Image (spheres, helix red, strand yellow):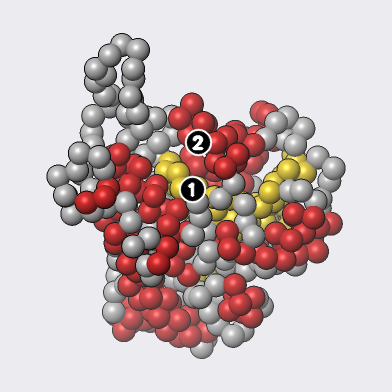
Amino acid sequence: MSHKDLSFDTRAIHVGEGAEFLEGSKNEVVAPIYLSSTYARKEVKNPGFYQYSRSQNPTRFALEERYASLEGTTYGLGFASGLAAEATILFALLKPGDHVIGFDDLYGGTKRLFHQWEEKYGITVSLVDAAVPKNVEDAILPQTKLIWLESPSNPLLKVCDIKAIANIAHKHQLLVIVDNTFLSPYFQKPAALGADIVVHSITKYIAGHSDVIGGAIMLNDKSLYDKIKFCQNSLGVVPSPFDCYLVLRGLKTLSMRMEKHQSNALAVATYLENHPKVARVYFPGLKSHPQYEIGLRQASGFGGMISFEVVGGEKEAVQFLESLKLFTLAESLGGVESLIEHPALMTHSSITAKERELAGIKDSLIRVSIGVEDQKDLIADLEQAFGMI
Ligand SMILES: Cc1ncc(COP(=O)(O)O)c(C=O)c1O
Protein backbone atom coordinates (compact mmCIF):
# COMPACT_ATOMS: atom_id res chain seq x y z
CA MET A 1 0.00 0.00 0.00
CA SER A 2 1.31 3.48 -0.86
CA HIS A 3 1.71 5.92 2.05
CA LYS A 4 -0.42 8.35 0.09
CA ASP A 5 -3.48 6.10 0.63
CA LEU A 6 -3.10 6.27 4.41
CA SER A 7 -4.68 8.89 6.67
CA PHE A 8 -2.63 11.54 8.52
CA ASP A 9 -2.79 9.75 11.88
CA THR A 10 -1.59 6.47 10.37
CA ARG A 11 1.25 8.13 8.47
CA ALA A 12 2.33 10.00 11.63
CA ILE A 13 2.98 6.57 13.19
CA HIS A 14 4.29 4.49 10.31
CA VAL A 15 6.05 6.49 7.59
CA GLY A 16 9.82 6.12 7.89
CA GLU A 17 9.65 3.31 10.43
CA GLY A 18 8.95 -0.39 10.15
CA ALA A 19 10.27 -3.23 8.06
CA GLU A 20 10.65 -1.29 4.81
CA PHE A 21 12.66 1.38 6.62
CA LEU A 22 16.20 0.40 5.73
CA GLU A 23 18.32 -1.99 3.77
CA GLY A 24 19.61 -4.62 6.18
CA SER A 25 16.70 -3.96 8.56
CA LYS A 26 16.13 -6.58 11.26
CA ASN A 27 12.43 -5.70 11.16
CA GLU A 28 12.72 -3.15 13.95
CA VAL A 29 9.34 -1.62 14.82
CA VAL A 30 11.02 1.59 16.01
CA ALA A 31 13.71 3.35 13.97
CA PRO A 32 17.15 2.62 15.44
CA ILE A 33 19.30 5.58 16.51
CA TYR A 34 22.29 5.42 14.17
CA LEU A 35 25.06 7.14 16.09
CA SER A 36 28.00 6.31 13.85
CA SER A 37 29.48 9.54 12.48
CA THR A 38 31.16 7.77 9.56
CA TYR A 39 30.80 4.63 7.43
CA ALA A 40 33.42 2.11 6.34
CA ARG A 41 33.96 1.58 2.65
CA LYS A 42 35.04 -1.69 1.10
CA GLU A 43 37.03 -0.13 -1.74
CA VAL A 44 38.95 3.17 -1.83
CA LYS A 45 37.30 4.28 -5.05
CA ASN A 46 33.81 3.10 -4.18
CA PRO A 47 32.36 5.14 -1.29
CA GLY A 48 28.89 3.57 -1.40
CA PHE A 49 25.79 5.59 -0.51
CA TYR A 50 26.44 6.08 3.23
CA GLN A 51 29.71 8.00 3.76
CA TYR A 52 29.49 10.53 6.60
CA SER A 53 26.63 11.20 8.98
CA ARG A 54 26.31 14.95 8.34
CA SER A 55 25.46 14.00 4.75
CA GLN A 56 23.65 10.67 5.25
CA ASN A 57 22.08 9.41 8.44
CA PRO A 58 19.39 6.69 8.38
CA THR A 59 17.54 7.98 11.48
CA ARG A 60 17.36 11.47 9.95
CA PHE A 61 16.27 10.07 6.61
CA ALA A 62 13.41 8.22 8.33
CA LEU A 63 12.29 11.48 9.94
CA GLU A 64 12.65 13.48 6.72
CA GLU A 65 10.43 10.97 4.92
CA ARG A 66 7.80 11.42 7.61
CA TYR A 67 8.05 15.22 7.48
CA ALA A 68 7.31 15.20 3.75
CA SER A 69 4.47 12.73 4.11
CA LEU A 70 2.71 14.72 6.85
CA GLU A 71 3.13 18.10 5.18
CA GLY A 72 1.97 16.58 1.85
CA THR A 73 5.16 17.54 -0.02
CA THR A 74 7.64 15.60 -2.12
CA TYR A 75 10.67 16.47 0.02
CA GLY A 76 11.45 16.96 3.73
CA LEU A 77 14.69 18.10 5.33
CA GLY A 78 15.68 18.06 9.00
CA PHE A 79 17.66 20.83 10.75
CA ALA A 80 19.30 21.45 14.11
CA SER A 81 16.76 24.18 14.99
CA GLY A 82 13.99 26.23 13.45
CA LEU A 83 16.40 29.14 13.04
CA ALA A 84 18.99 26.86 11.42
CA ALA A 85 16.34 25.93 8.84
CA GLU A 86 15.47 29.62 8.32
CA ALA A 87 19.11 30.70 7.98
CA THR A 88 19.67 27.91 5.46
CA ILE A 89 16.82 29.22 3.29
CA LEU A 90 18.36 32.72 3.31
CA PHE A 91 21.82 31.31 2.62
CA ALA A 92 20.60 29.10 -0.22
CA LEU A 93 18.33 31.56 -1.99
CA LEU A 94 19.49 35.16 -1.47
CA LYS A 95 22.34 37.28 -2.78
CA PRO A 96 23.37 40.87 -1.92
CA GLY A 97 20.85 43.41 -3.20
CA ASP A 98 17.83 41.08 -2.86
CA HIS A 99 14.69 42.21 -1.07
CA VAL A 100 12.44 40.20 1.28
CA ILE A 101 8.89 41.00 2.36
CA GLY A 102 7.95 39.67 5.80
CA PHE A 103 4.82 39.66 7.95
CA ASP A 104 5.19 42.45 10.54
CA ASP A 105 4.31 39.99 13.34
CA LEU A 106 6.97 37.33 12.70
CA TYR A 107 8.74 35.54 15.56
CA GLY A 108 11.37 37.90 17.05
CA GLY A 109 14.28 35.57 16.23
CA THR A 110 13.27 35.56 12.55
CA LYS A 111 13.28 39.36 12.53
CA ARG A 112 16.68 39.35 14.26
CA LEU A 113 18.01 37.02 11.54
CA PHE A 114 16.66 39.34 8.84
CA HIS A 115 18.36 42.32 10.54
CA GLN A 116 21.69 40.48 10.56
CA TRP A 117 21.36 39.77 6.85
CA GLU A 118 20.50 43.43 6.22
CA GLU A 119 23.58 44.60 8.13
CA LYS A 120 26.06 42.02 6.91
CA TYR A 121 24.95 40.73 3.54
CA GLY A 122 23.27 43.71 1.87
CA ILE A 123 19.73 42.42 1.62
CA THR A 124 16.74 44.63 2.47
CA VAL A 125 13.57 43.64 4.30
CA SER A 126 10.12 45.26 4.37
CA LEU A 127 7.80 44.17 7.16
CA VAL A 128 4.12 44.66 6.33
CA ASP A 129 0.75 43.71 7.78
CA ALA A 130 0.16 40.65 5.60
CA ALA A 131 -3.30 40.14 7.11
CA VAL A 132 -4.23 42.51 4.24
CA PRO A 133 -2.84 40.84 1.04
CA LYS A 134 -2.74 44.17 -0.82
CA ASN A 135 -0.09 45.40 1.64
CA VAL A 136 2.16 42.58 0.40
CA GLU A 137 1.57 43.41 -3.26
CA ASP A 138 2.24 47.11 -2.61
CA ALA A 139 5.62 46.27 -1.02
CA ILE A 140 6.95 44.33 -4.05
CA LEU A 141 10.07 45.88 -5.59
CA PRO A 142 11.96 44.83 -8.75
CA GLN A 143 14.59 43.16 -6.50
CA THR A 144 12.07 41.28 -4.28
CA LYS A 145 12.77 37.52 -4.08
CA LEU A 146 10.88 36.10 -1.10
CA ILE A 147 7.68 36.64 0.86
CA TRP A 148 7.95 35.28 4.41
CA LEU A 149 4.75 34.52 6.33
CA GLU A 150 3.54 32.97 9.55
CA SER A 151 -0.12 32.13 10.00
CA PRO A 152 -1.11 32.48 12.77
CA SER A 153 1.71 34.89 13.55
CA ASN A 154 3.78 35.19 16.71
CA PRO A 155 2.74 36.67 19.17
CA LEU A 156 -0.42 38.46 17.96
CA LEU A 157 -1.96 35.42 16.25
CA LYS A 158 -2.77 37.36 13.09
CA VAL A 159 -3.93 35.16 10.22
CA CYS A 160 -3.03 35.86 6.60
CA ASP A 161 -4.65 34.48 3.46
CA ILE A 162 -1.88 32.17 2.24
CA LYS A 163 -3.56 31.31 -1.08
CA ALA A 164 -4.25 34.96 -1.98
CA ILE A 165 -0.65 35.95 -1.15
CA ALA A 166 0.78 32.95 -3.05
CA ASN A 167 -1.23 34.01 -6.12
CA ILE A 168 0.18 37.54 -5.87
CA ALA A 169 3.70 36.18 -5.38
CA HIS A 170 3.56 33.80 -8.30
CA LYS A 171 2.24 36.54 -10.60
CA HIS A 172 5.53 38.33 -9.82
CA GLN A 173 7.72 35.15 -9.91
CA LEU A 174 8.40 35.37 -6.16
CA LEU A 175 8.73 32.54 -3.67
CA VAL A 176 6.45 32.22 -0.65
CA ILE A 177 7.81 30.76 2.58
CA VAL A 178 5.34 29.87 5.32
CA ASP A 179 6.40 29.16 8.90
CA ASN A 180 3.80 26.55 9.91
CA THR A 181 5.03 26.11 13.48
CA PHE A 182 1.87 27.32 15.24
CA LEU A 183 -0.61 24.96 13.57
CA SER A 184 1.61 22.03 12.53
CA PRO A 185 0.70 20.01 9.42
CA TYR A 186 -2.14 18.44 11.40
CA PHE A 187 -4.19 21.65 11.15
CA GLN A 188 -2.70 23.44 8.13
CA LYS A 189 -0.84 22.50 4.94
CA PRO A 190 0.57 25.69 3.39
CA ALA A 191 2.10 23.86 0.39
CA ALA A 192 -1.42 22.84 -0.71
CA LEU A 193 -2.39 26.54 -0.46
CA GLY A 194 0.47 27.58 -2.76
CA ALA A 195 3.49 28.04 -0.46
CA ASP A 196 6.76 27.10 -2.16
CA ILE A 197 8.59 26.30 1.08
CA VAL A 198 7.18 25.34 4.48
CA VAL A 199 9.43 25.83 7.48
CA HIS A 200 8.96 24.63 11.07
CA SER A 201 10.42 25.02 14.49
CA ILE A 202 10.19 21.31 15.31
CA THR A 203 11.02 22.31 18.90
CA LYS A 204 7.31 23.15 19.31
CA TYR A 205 4.22 21.02 18.53
CA ILE A 206 5.91 18.51 16.22
CA ALA A 207 8.36 17.24 18.86
CA GLY A 208 5.78 18.22 21.46
CA HIS A 209 7.48 17.49 24.78
CA SER A 210 9.86 20.46 25.35
CA ASP A 211 12.90 18.20 25.08
CA VAL A 212 14.20 18.76 21.53
CA ILE A 213 15.49 21.73 19.54
CA GLY A 214 14.88 21.07 15.85
CA GLY A 215 13.78 22.51 12.53
CA ALA A 216 12.39 21.30 9.22
CA ILE A 217 11.81 22.38 5.65
CA MET A 218 9.21 20.74 3.41
CA LEU A 219 8.81 21.52 -0.30
CA ASN A 220 7.90 20.16 -3.74
CA ASP A 221 10.26 21.84 -6.20
CA LYS A 222 13.30 19.68 -7.05
CA SER A 223 15.66 22.54 -7.91
CA LEU A 224 14.84 24.42 -4.67
CA TYR A 225 15.22 21.17 -2.75
CA ASP A 226 18.65 20.53 -4.31
CA LYS A 227 19.85 24.05 -3.38
CA ILE A 228 18.62 23.81 0.22
CA LYS A 229 19.83 20.23 0.70
CA PHE A 230 23.27 21.26 -0.57
CA CYS A 231 23.40 24.01 2.10
CA GLN A 232 22.02 21.68 4.81
CA ASN A 233 25.19 19.66 4.28
CA SER A 234 27.63 22.47 3.50
CA LEU A 235 26.57 24.48 6.59
CA GLY A 236 26.31 21.31 8.69
CA VAL A 237 23.05 22.39 10.32
CA VAL A 238 21.72 18.85 10.80
CA PRO A 239 19.86 17.44 13.82
CA SER A 240 21.46 14.72 15.95
CA PRO A 241 20.27 11.12 15.49
CA PHE A 242 18.95 11.07 19.05
CA ASP A 243 16.88 14.20 18.46
CA CYS A 244 15.53 12.63 15.24
CA TYR A 245 14.44 9.61 17.25
CA LEU A 246 12.68 11.84 19.81
CA VAL A 247 10.83 13.67 17.04
CA LEU A 248 9.80 10.40 15.33
CA ARG A 249 8.42 9.34 18.70
CA GLY A 250 6.71 12.66 19.46
CA LEU A 251 5.03 12.75 16.04
CA LYS A 252 3.12 9.56 16.77
CA THR A 253 0.76 11.48 19.08
CA LEU A 254 0.64 14.76 17.12
CA SER A 255 -3.02 14.52 16.12
CA MET A 256 -4.22 13.66 19.65
CA ARG A 257 -2.11 16.39 21.21
CA MET A 258 -3.25 19.04 18.72
CA GLU A 259 -6.93 18.23 19.32
CA LYS A 260 -6.48 18.55 23.10
CA HIS A 261 -4.34 21.71 22.84
CA GLN A 262 -7.09 23.23 20.74
CA SER A 263 -10.11 22.27 22.87
CA ASN A 264 -8.30 23.50 25.99
CA ALA A 265 -7.32 26.74 24.23
CA LEU A 266 -10.88 27.43 23.15
CA ALA A 267 -12.09 26.99 26.75
CA VAL A 268 -9.33 29.25 28.14
CA ALA A 269 -9.81 31.91 25.42
CA THR A 270 -13.56 32.03 26.14
CA TYR A 271 -12.83 32.36 29.87
CA LEU A 272 -10.33 35.18 29.22
CA GLU A 273 -12.67 37.00 26.84
CA ASN A 274 -15.22 37.31 29.66
CA HIS A 275 -12.74 38.31 32.38
CA PRO A 276 -12.91 41.92 33.73
CA LYS A 277 -9.10 42.08 34.15
CA VAL A 278 -8.47 41.19 30.50
CA ALA A 279 -8.41 44.06 28.01
CA ARG A 280 -8.14 42.00 24.81
CA VAL A 281 -7.81 38.36 23.71
CA TYR A 282 -6.05 37.17 20.54
CA PHE A 283 -7.13 33.66 19.52
CA PRO A 284 -7.98 32.73 15.90
CA GLY A 285 -10.69 30.34 17.12
CA LEU A 286 -12.83 33.11 18.62
CA LYS A 287 -15.53 34.56 16.37
CA SER A 288 -14.35 38.01 17.50
CA HIS A 289 -10.93 37.41 15.81
CA PRO A 290 -10.65 39.74 12.77
CA GLN A 291 -9.49 36.94 10.44
CA TYR A 292 -11.69 34.18 11.92
CA GLU A 293 -13.24 33.37 8.52
CA ILE A 294 -9.89 33.12 6.71
CA GLY A 295 -8.59 30.76 9.40
CA LEU A 296 -11.69 28.62 9.05
CA ARG A 297 -11.25 28.43 5.27
CA GLN A 298 -7.55 27.61 5.06
CA ALA A 299 -6.92 25.46 8.14
CA SER A 300 -8.78 22.62 9.84
CA GLY A 301 -8.11 24.06 13.31
CA PHE A 302 -6.97 27.13 15.23
CA GLY A 303 -4.26 25.61 17.41
CA GLY A 304 -3.40 26.07 21.05
CA MET A 305 -1.75 29.51 21.22
CA ILE A 306 -3.46 32.48 22.87
CA SER A 307 -2.24 36.00 23.57
CA PHE A 308 -4.03 38.51 25.77
CA GLU A 309 -3.56 41.94 27.31
CA VAL A 310 -4.19 42.40 31.02
CA VAL A 311 -5.85 45.60 32.20
CA GLY A 312 -2.88 47.81 33.21
CA GLY A 313 0.68 47.57 31.94
CA GLU A 314 3.99 45.81 32.52
CA LYS A 315 3.61 45.85 36.33
CA GLU A 316 0.26 44.01 36.29
CA ALA A 317 1.44 41.58 33.59
CA VAL A 318 4.60 40.67 35.54
CA GLN A 319 2.67 40.33 38.83
CA PHE A 320 0.15 38.05 37.12
CA LEU A 321 2.86 35.88 35.52
CA GLU A 322 4.78 35.52 38.77
CA SER A 323 1.60 34.50 40.65
CA LEU A 324 0.85 31.45 38.48
CA LYS A 325 1.47 28.04 40.01
CA LEU A 326 0.61 25.52 37.28
CA PHE A 327 1.57 27.46 34.13
CA THR A 328 5.34 27.47 33.72
CA LEU A 329 6.90 30.88 33.10
CA ALA A 330 9.10 29.99 30.14
CA GLU A 331 9.83 30.79 26.51
CA SER A 332 8.86 28.28 23.80
CA LEU A 333 5.52 26.66 23.10
CA GLY A 334 3.85 23.55 21.77
CA GLY A 335 4.80 21.17 24.59
CA VAL A 336 2.34 19.05 26.57
CA GLU A 337 2.75 21.40 29.56
CA SER A 338 1.24 24.89 29.54
CA LEU A 339 3.87 27.63 29.15
CA ILE A 340 3.33 31.35 29.58
CA GLU A 341 5.53 34.35 28.86
CA HIS A 342 5.82 38.12 28.42
CA PRO A 343 6.74 38.75 24.73
CA ALA A 344 8.14 42.29 25.24
CA LEU A 345 10.53 41.12 28.01
CA MET A 346 11.16 37.57 26.78
CA THR A 347 10.64 36.07 23.26
CA HIS A 348 10.48 39.40 21.44
CA SER A 349 13.06 41.34 23.47
CA SER A 350 15.57 40.83 20.61
CA ILE A 351 13.68 43.42 18.52
CA THR A 352 13.69 47.11 19.38
CA ALA A 353 11.01 48.79 21.53
CA LYS A 354 10.09 50.92 18.50
CA GLU A 355 9.52 47.83 16.36
CA ARG A 356 7.45 46.23 19.10
CA GLU A 357 5.32 49.35 19.32
CA LEU A 358 4.84 49.37 15.53
CA ALA A 359 3.91 45.67 15.60
CA GLY A 360 1.40 46.25 18.45
CA ILE A 361 3.28 44.20 21.08
CA LYS A 362 2.30 46.04 24.26
CA ASP A 363 3.87 45.74 27.72
CA SER A 364 0.54 44.35 28.99
CA LEU A 365 0.68 41.48 26.47
CA ILE A 366 0.99 37.88 27.67
CA ARG A 367 1.41 34.84 25.38
CA VAL A 368 0.22 31.40 26.45
CA SER A 369 0.92 27.98 25.02
CA ILE A 370 -1.98 25.89 26.25
CA GLY A 371 -0.90 22.38 27.15
CA VAL A 372 -2.87 19.16 27.37
CA GLU A 373 -3.59 19.27 31.12
CA ASP A 374 -7.15 19.33 32.43
CA GLN A 375 -8.71 22.65 31.40
CA LYS A 376 -10.41 23.08 34.82
CA ASP A 377 -7.00 23.10 36.53
CA LEU A 378 -5.65 25.62 34.00
CA ILE A 379 -8.57 28.01 34.45
CA ALA A 380 -8.39 27.70 38.26
CA ASP A 381 -4.71 28.72 38.16
CA LEU A 382 -5.44 31.73 35.92
CA GLU A 383 -8.29 32.75 38.25
CA GLN A 384 -6.10 32.70 41.37
CA ALA A 385 -3.38 34.73 39.57
CA PHE A 386 -5.92 37.35 38.43
CA GLY A 387 -6.84 37.64 42.11
CA MET A 388 -3.26 38.84 42.80
CA ILE A 389 -3.37 41.90 40.48
C1 LIG B 1 7.10 30.65 14.85
C2 LIG B 1 8.52 30.31 15.16
N1 LIG B 1 9.38 30.07 14.15
C3 LIG B 1 10.68 29.77 14.38
C4 LIG B 1 11.18 29.68 15.66
C5 LIG B 1 12.64 29.34 15.88
O1 LIG B 1 12.75 27.99 16.17
P1 LIG B 1 13.92 27.36 17.09
O2 LIG B 1 13.76 27.94 18.46
O3 LIG B 1 13.64 25.89 17.01
O4 LIG B 1 15.21 27.74 16.46
C6 LIG B 1 10.32 29.91 16.74
C7 LIG B 1 10.84 29.82 18.13
O5 LIG B 1 10.17 30.19 19.06
C8 LIG B 1 8.96 30.22 16.48
O6 LIG B 1 8.09 30.47 17.48
Q: Quick one: SS at disc 1? A: strand
Residue 362, how many percent across, how many down?
61, 63
Residue that numbered label 1 is attached to: 75
The residue lying at 56 percent from left, 75 percent from top is 284
Residue type at tag 2: Lys
Among the 4 quarters of the image, the one containing residue 125: top right
Mark nearer the viewer, 2 or 1: 1
The dot on residue 229 is 2
Task: From the viewer's perspective, tell me whether residue 150 is left or right of residue 139.
Answer: left
Q: Quick one: SS at disc 2? A: helix
The residue lying at 62 percent from left, 52 percent from top is 196
Task: From the viewer's perspective, tell me whether residue 10 is left or right of residue 110.
Answer: left
Callout 2: 10 Å neighbours few (<14), some, many (20+)? many
Residue sitting nearer the eye, 227 or 258: 227
- Is 237 located above or below residue 71 in the figure? above
The residue lying at 56 percent from left, 50 percent from top is 220
- Is 89 located above or below residue 169 in the figure? above
Residue sitting nearer the eye, 263 or 375: 263
As drawn, the residue found furthest toward the bottom would be 274
